[in-house]
Image: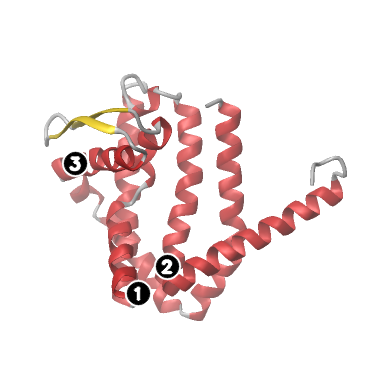
Amino acid sequence: MSRLGAVTFSLGACLLTAAALPGLAVGVLADPWQGGMFLGGALTARALRDSIRRMRFFNAFAHELSHTLVALITRGRVTQFYATDTRGGHMQHAGGARLPIVIAPYVLPIGALVLVAALLIVGLTPNRLAAAALGLACGFHVVRMLDDIAACQSRHWQGTDFAFFGPQPTLAIIVGVNALILSTLLAFALGGAAGIAHFWTGAGTHALQGLASLRALVPGLPA
């Protein structure tokens, strides 16, 4: 993927997220405690950053598991998998969609997604405790993601996940995808499945309105 394509994708994802922010703000104002519990959980993960860093085996396992899950989902075949507390981990695959596999550990908050899936299966809307747990899982993801990126940068990106497509395009895509996923999880914490639907409906509506305004300003744009 070209650097321009990656930046364009990231910008589009961030703008789509920004288009839905008014709806998220209304949700937070409607129930400040629910949004506050989510934020409190995320800040707790930030405060526990040193403890999270010491969970070396778990971090390596979660990283390689993310690669593995996306490889399998995209019809790839895993040929090697290991995680250690001293040498990190490694996952080797054949086939599958390379870009989603590469960025998976940096954009998939596995703990939060498991909790969302469990709540959806039993048909429950998140209460304040669940909102705090979702915030904690998202904060854990951000802490681990930033540490992984810093570790790759310390190696000048050589032999890391960022070597496949280049650090700048990969980072741009990671920013855009995280903006969408983390905002969607906040929407779920505020209103469950209905919150997600409201988030994406609002994002789509505002995005279409923005495009209509842009076409009015620039008549040459395709309809």
* CA neighbours of label 3 inside 10 A, class few (<14), some (14 to 19), many (20+): some
- Marks 1/3: CA–CA distance: 28 Å
Please state the horizontal and vertical placement of residue 74, each as a whole percent of the image: 37, 39
Instruction: Give the number of the disc on residue 61.
Output: 3
Residue 118 located left or right of residue 197: left
On screen, 94 above or below 195? above
Asked if the residue at tag 3 contacts the one at tag 1, i.e. Cβ–Cβ closer than 8 Å, the answer is no
Can I make out residue 177 in this image?
A: yes
Please state the horizontal and vertical placement of residue 84, each as a whole percent of the image: 12, 35
Please state the horizontal and vertical placement of residue 141, each as a whole percent of the image: 32, 50
Asked if the residue at tag 2 contacts the one at tag 3, i.e. Cβ–Cβ closer than 8 Å, the answer is no
Mark 1 is on which residue type?
Pro
Can I make out residue 24 in this image?
A: no
Instruction: Give the number of the disc on residue 126.
Output: 1
Asked if the residue at tag 2 contacts the one at tag 1, i.e. Cβ–Cβ closer than 8 Å, the answer is yes
* CA neighbours of label 1 inside 10 A, class few (<14), some (14 to 19), many (20+): many
- Nearer to the camera, 141 or 95: 95
Residue placed furthest toward the front: 75
The local secondary structure at tag 3 comes to: helix
Instruction: Give the number of the disc on residue 188.
Output: 2
- Marks 3/2: CA–CA distance: 26 Å
